[in-house]
Each structure stands twice: as C-alpha cells, then as structure tokens.
Image: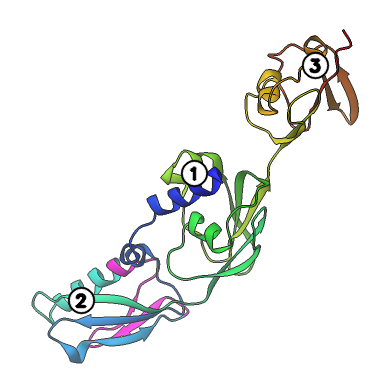
Amino acid sequence: MDKIYKFIWVLILFSLPLIAFSQEYTIGEGDVLDIKVYENEDLSTTVRVSANSTIRVPLIGEISIKDLTVSQISSKIEALYEDGYLINPQVDVFIKEHRSKKAVILGQIKNPGQYELRGRVTILEFISTAGGLTEDAGGTATIKRLTASGENKDQIVLDLEKLIKKGDVSLNIPVQDNDSIYISKAKTYYVSGEVTKPNQYVYEQELTVIKAITMAGGFSKIAAKDKVQIIRLINGEKKILEKVNMDEPVLPDDVIVVPESFF
C-alpha cells in the first residue's frame, strides 16, 4: 500500500498543467492547429500539419514547423507577419487535434498493451494509464525507442527506485511515438526455516543475512542462529554455504535456511 501511495504522490508532485504540456509538445504530421491572429480574424485559420511538417498560413503561404513546439510556432508566425505585413502581431496557436501517436508498455504492469499518446505524456503518466505497476515490478523501465519504420533508434534504462521512491523528476521523461516500454520483474530471495515469516522477499541492494532475517520477522525461539545456511546457484549448480556470518551479502535468488536448534 505504501508503494501505491508513494507512486500517486510522485505522479501528482511532478504533473504540470495541461497548458504547459501543450507548449512543450513537439508538433508533427497529422496534428491539427488553430491559429488565432489578434484583431485580424481574416488571418485566423485551422490547419493540418503535412507529411513534410509544413502548414499554410494566410498571406505568408507554406512554412516549415519541423521539430517546433506550439510556442515556437507562434513566435515564428509573429516574426513572419511582422516582416512587412502587420505591426506588433499577436499570434496564438492551439492544438485542436493530436495525431494518432501510440506506445506499448509490457512486463510488470497491471494492464499491458498499446496506448494512444494525447499530447505530452510522461513515463509516470503512461504507467498510470496502464493501471500502475504490479507487486512484482522491479527497479527498471527499459524504453526501446523506434523510428516510424520500426527500426531501433535508442534504448533508455530508467531507475524506477529513484523516480518513484526518491522523486527524481529528471527521470520522468516524455514517452514518444512508437516507444516500447518494458517494466522489469523484481529480483527476489527466500528465507525459510526457523523465522517468524518464512517467505519470498523482494531483493534490495546491500542486503545482508541479518537484514534478510529481520525482514522475515526475526529468528524463532528454536532457531539455530549459528548454523544459518545459504543455498546459492553458482554456474548453474546449487551450492550450500554453511554457518554463514550475519553480515554475509545476500544475492538475488539466494535461499536462506535457518535450521532448528535441538539443544
């Protein structure tokens, strides 16, 4: 439950107003824009961005808006009108309709699948759209960034621990068209035998035997504390580490066994 609350808190903390999203959103093919020219209604128009990232503007004609945001387009049109057409023009650009952008999210997510991107969507928002993380979610989100033709463009690995638990806003990056996101499964270890709560637990960095046993509720009254074992997979073979120290590091998939004391 704490994990869910932390996730919601971070999502709210780093969400920005929708108007800010539209200002930062990079306009592309298929987007429909409303262009309003203050006190010049005859110059106001609605346009769809062409395949080569151009639009047609009254008086000016065709202009390129490749890789520009809404605010940058507004500034560009104002500069063009000011160059021999209008005095101190004021131009507002609004997104009337987003093109169909989609991304996929898989792995340890409650509702994996493909989702449409409407405007600027951050990784936290996208995870929320897909129902949030499962209980088995690990510490990384891997984003495979593809081109429109499906070719690999880039790969980004995000530390979900820093993003969600520590609130590192720099990791809350926008999801892009054709992104494929994979949420890893958590690494685990096992504690069995004479402990209060023998079970499987989520692995954490710098985990030791005593920390693992503490997570399992501590030793039972009949535990042989000096005979703790670790069953570890080494090069594909199970090895038993006898009488391990309490500060012995625990590795993912280790099985910690606390035997019963007969004396």
Q: Quadrant of residue 116?
A: bottom right
**For residue 64, above or below residue 188:** below
Give the magenta range: 51-71
- The numbered mark, 1 or 2, whose residue comes first in the sequence reads 2
User: Does 232 appear in magenta?
Assistant: no
Helix, strand, or loop for circle 3? Answer: loop
Residue found farthest to the left = 87
Which amino acid, mark 2? Val
Mark nearest the camera among 1 and 2 is: 1
Is tag 2's residue or tag 3's residue first in the polypeptide sequence?
A: 2
Taking 220 as reference, is 31 above or below it? below
Q: Where does residue 11 sit, x and y in percent of width and height?
A: 44, 53
Q: Which residue is mark 3?
A: 223
Report the quarter where the C terminus lies.
Answer: top right
Which of the labelled discs sits on residue 91, or is there none? 2
**Disc 2 from disc 3: Cα separation:** 76 Å
Q: CA distance from mark 1 to mark 2?
A: 37 Å
**Residue at the disc numbered 1:** 163
Q: Is residue 69 magenta?
A: yes
